[in-house]
Image (cartoon, grey):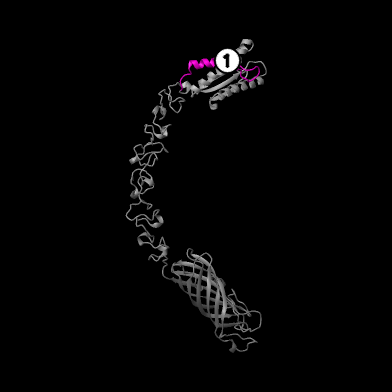
Amino acid sequence: MKKLFIISMVFFGLVCISNAQTVENKWSIGINGGLNQYNGDLGRGFYKFNKGTFGFGGLSVSRYLNRFLDVSVSGNYGTMGYTDGDSNSFKSNLTHANINVRLKFIGNDKHKIVPYVFGGLGFLHFGKVTNSKTAAQPDNKELTKYGSAARPVCGLGVTFHIIPLLSLQLQESFIFSDYDKVDGKIGWKRYNDNYVQHSIGLSFNFGKPRDTDKDGIPDKKDKCPKVWGLAQYEGCPDTDKDGVIDNLDECPDTPEGVKVDAKGCPLDRDGDGIPDYKDKCPDVKGLAKFEGCPDSDGDGVTDADDMCPDTPEGVKVDKRGCPLDRDGDKVPDYQDSCPDVKGLEKFHGCPDRDGDGIPDYLDKCPDVLGIPENKGCPPVKEEVKEVFRKALQGIKFETAKDIIRPVSFPILNNVVDIMKENKEYNLIINGHTDNVGTDEYNKDLSNRRAASVRKYLIDHGVEANRLKSFGWGEEKPAADNNTEAGRTINRRVEFIVEF
């Protein structure tokens, strides 16, 4: 039971205080106490509590650096020794001071239990050594008051945060000595004299509460610790003074005095994105370029000023918002097929100068009454039809050739006169043959004969662009090719007027 009790005491051994303070309490003063144990030439006493356990007590001062690091200065005074029979025993007063840096594994600010390791430099001073009777050291005069500086120290521990101002620490410290004299075995065996301290302690944490933004509200109570704020908003700012703090305010630059919604943005009753205080039409959804007023037809004239608010999209309008009507015929340009000439609504704004019911842009004879079949031109005169009928059989060619015989010239000259007198006429010249000969031959012959007629008319003053010629060969007979009379009728030149 005694051994179990001693082991328990070792586990809860006193600590050099540090690691207890936080960012809010950066300074800490600690009291601690515990047990010293020796390990050296006389033997290993670490964790062997029957070889000598001697007490000590001490003080420490620590400074918080950040969540993971702090620095500590500590000192303690007590007894050091070893017991293993009369010949291997000693005891001495021990003063130990050190400075060290501690690494906290999981940070110190948010956790109740924080393990750590530490390392640094220490100073050892021994008082008078007693009960060190050895053959090598017959008296004790040389063994009093030993001291040494810059001795390394390291260890590990754990901090328990009880309350913000009070912490409990458990720690194991390993002190490495460059002396080999205290145990009386000077140069006798293997080891320098080294020590372990088992410690437990309490630290009292204090310091001025952190106030990063200097607004008088401690960071731990400040919901906006990095920005100067107001107590009424728990340390958060309200730059535009609209009653909504900046970190919740979606419109932090709202002019002072403007009514806002729960998000801190100016009220926008019609939801058009233009706040009411800038919206000339606050109850109707509108456009920013019109200061919140609508333009239903998108013509660039607001509805309030638009005399034609239903103008189709994309149509050019005048200052009144109505479609342009350049020619003033009351047919808007976007519906006017003749926007620069005054016309009639039934003809999509185009005129009908001759009044024949065919608009000028479709009328090949816009200044003469005509008929739809002739695209607004008058019917072909009967005397013209008669000339074309005579031409069917009256135009003769040399046998199997495209040379026009002189007997045909009077008829062709009549056709020339007709074309010169009727400038609206265009003429189609179709050549036909009977079925004597091959299809290919007849097709070629009829084509060449029609072309010869076209050339004659051109040579006699008819514009070439008014004449077209085609050869149909035997494809379109007008009579029976099985009789001589029928074949004679089929050998013909046909004139068709087009407009």
Among all residues in the image, which is located at the extreme right?
438
Secondary structure of the residue carrying tag 1 is helix
Task: Based on the picture, tell me whether residue 156 belongs to the magenta stretch.
Answer: no
Among all residues in the image, which is located at the extreme left?
257
Instruction: State whether residue 2 appears in this view.
Output: no
Which residue occupies 57% across, 24% down? Answer: 459
Residue 197 position, x and y percent, is: 55, 75
Which residue occupies 38% across, 45% down? Answer: 287
Viewer-proximal residue among 366 and 261: 366
Q: In the figure, 166 relative to 481: above or below? A: below
The total of numbered circles placed on residues is: 1
Residue 355 position, x and y percent, is: 40, 23
Which residue occupies 53% across, 77% down? Answer: 98
Task: Based on the picture, tell me whether residue 387 belongs to the magenta stretch.
Answer: yes
- Residue 371, quarter of the rendered image: top left
Which residue position is annotated with label 1? 394
Residue range highlighted in magenta:
377-406
Residue 177 position, x and y percent, is: 59, 79
Viewer-proximal residue among 93 and 256: 256
- Residue 321, quarter of the rendered image: top left
Instruction: State whether residue 221 appears in this view.
Output: yes
Viewer-proximal residue among 104 and 128: 104
Q: In the figure, 197 relative to 418: above or below? A: below
**Which residue type carries mark 1?**
Gly
Q: In the figure, 109 relative to 122: above or below? A: above
Count neighbours of disc 1 (C-alpha within 10 A) and say few if under 14, some if 14 to 19, many if 20 or more: some
